[in-house]
Image (cartoon, grey):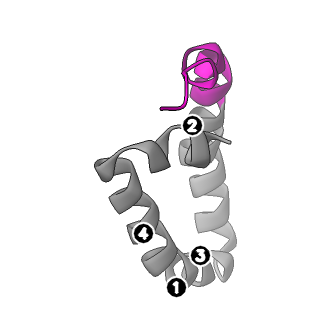
């Protein structure tokens, strides 16, 4: 939803999605092999982003599609 309705609607967002799909698999594999790094990423990166997206969902989910 966020990817399709927000990121893919603008050039910088599209570039970010392309970058993510190119580089995330090897990074995810590296992280998956290290328990301490999985915990660090989950608690220090993923959890705060999920919280921000949940708190601001009303802002980005209500935008009209051009």
Marks 2, 4: nearer the viewer: 4
Query: Gap in Å between the C-alphas at discs 2 and 1?
Result: 21 Å
The stretch of residues the image draws in magenta is 51-66
Dot 2 corresponds to which residue?
49
**Tag 3 near tag 1, CB within 8 Å:** yes
- Whether residue 25 is in magenta: the answer is no
Magenta portion: prevailing SS class = helix
| SS at badge 4 | helix
Residue that appears at 67% across and 77% down: 32
Dot 1 corresponds to which residue?
26
In the figure, residue 5 lies in which quadrant? top right
Up/down of 13 relative to 38, above or below: above
Q: Residues within 10 Å of mark 1 (few under 14, many from 20)?
A: few
Query: Gap in Å between the C-alphas at discs 4 and 1?
Result: 14 Å
Query: Gap in Å between the C-alphas at discs 2 and 4?
Result: 19 Å
Query: Gap in Å between the C-alphas at discs 3 and 1?
Result: 5 Å
Query: Gap in Å between the C-alphas at discs 3 and 2?
Result: 17 Å
Residue that appears at 30% across and 51% down: 11
Decide which of tag 4 and tag 3 comes sooner along the chain: 4
Up/down of 27 relative to 36, above or below: below
Decide which of tag 3 and tag 2 comes sooner along the chain: 3
Residue that appears at 54% across and 21% down: 63
In the figure, residue 50 lies in which quadrant? top right
Percent x, y of residue 35 = 69, 71
Decide which of tag 2 and tag 1 comes sooner along the chain: 1
Dot 3 corresponds to which residue?
28
In the figure, residue 29 lies in which quadrant? bottom right
Q: Residues within 10 Å of mark 3 (few under 14, many from 20)?
A: few
Dot 4 corresponds to which residue?
18
Q: Quadrant of the N terminus?
A: top right
């Amino acid at each position: 939803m966020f990817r399709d309705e927000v990121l893919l609607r603008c050039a910088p967002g599209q570039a970010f999605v392309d970058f993510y799909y190119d580089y995330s698999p090897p990074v995810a594999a590296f992280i998956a092999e290290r328990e301490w790094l999985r915990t660090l990423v989950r608690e220090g990166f993923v959890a705060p982003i999920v919280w921000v997206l949940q708190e601001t969902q009303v802002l980005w989910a209500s935008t009209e599609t051009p």
